[in-house]
Image (cartoon, rainbow, N blue to C red):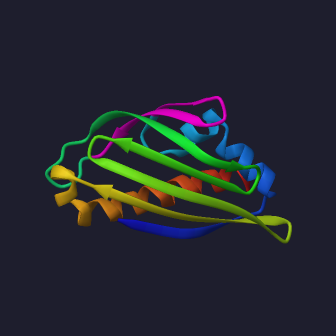
Amino acid sequence: MDISGTQQFNSSPQTVWDALHNSATLQSCIPGAQSVAWQGDNLLNATINMPGVGPIGGGTRSLTIQATESTPPSHLKFEIARGPVTAHAVVDLAPNGSGTTLTYTAHATLSGALGLADGLAKPMVENGLNQFFSKLQQQVG
């Protein structure tokens, strides 16, 4: 599953970067997040109430997300591997006048029973991203 897009913010790249590295901000923006905590600069732990996907039931999941590249305040690459999901994503922030253009690309491989629901998962992930970016926009402008 491949997902990509851009988002515009009225704030500087540093402000957006800081928001993406603020545990409380992330927790308030991530749909279903029960807890989100950065452990240093490269490890993010999150507990999220996930919706069901097709025949796969939802529930609370703990995730560890590893930042494998970080160039403040413009570039972040992270990876996640949990059960049937392996994913990596790249987020780039670029100045755009007095604001910021955020560009993201992500690739996820779903295996097992979840792989069978790949067609259902993508619209749910895209909806979650839209909710996340809408809330982040409200917080950072």
Q: Is residue 16 above or below residue 39?
A: below
Residue 100 as seen in the image, left or right of residue 3: right
Q: Which percent across, then down, holds residue 47?
A: 42, 32
Magenta residues (range): 34-51
Question: At 65% across and 46% down in the image, what residue appears?
Answer: 20
- The dominant secondary structure in magenta is strand
User: Above or below — where is 44 with respect to 12?
Assistant: above
Q: Residue 46 colored magenta?
A: yes
- Residue 78 % position (x, y): 54, 49
Which corner quadrant holds the C terminus? bottom right
Residue 132: percent from the left, percent from the top?
53, 53
Quarter residue 57 falls in: top left
Rendered image quadrant of residue 8? bottom right
Q: Is residue 94 magenta?
A: no
- Which residue is at a point 74% across and 44% down the rendered structure image? 18
Q: Nearer the viewer, residue 94 or 52?
A: 94
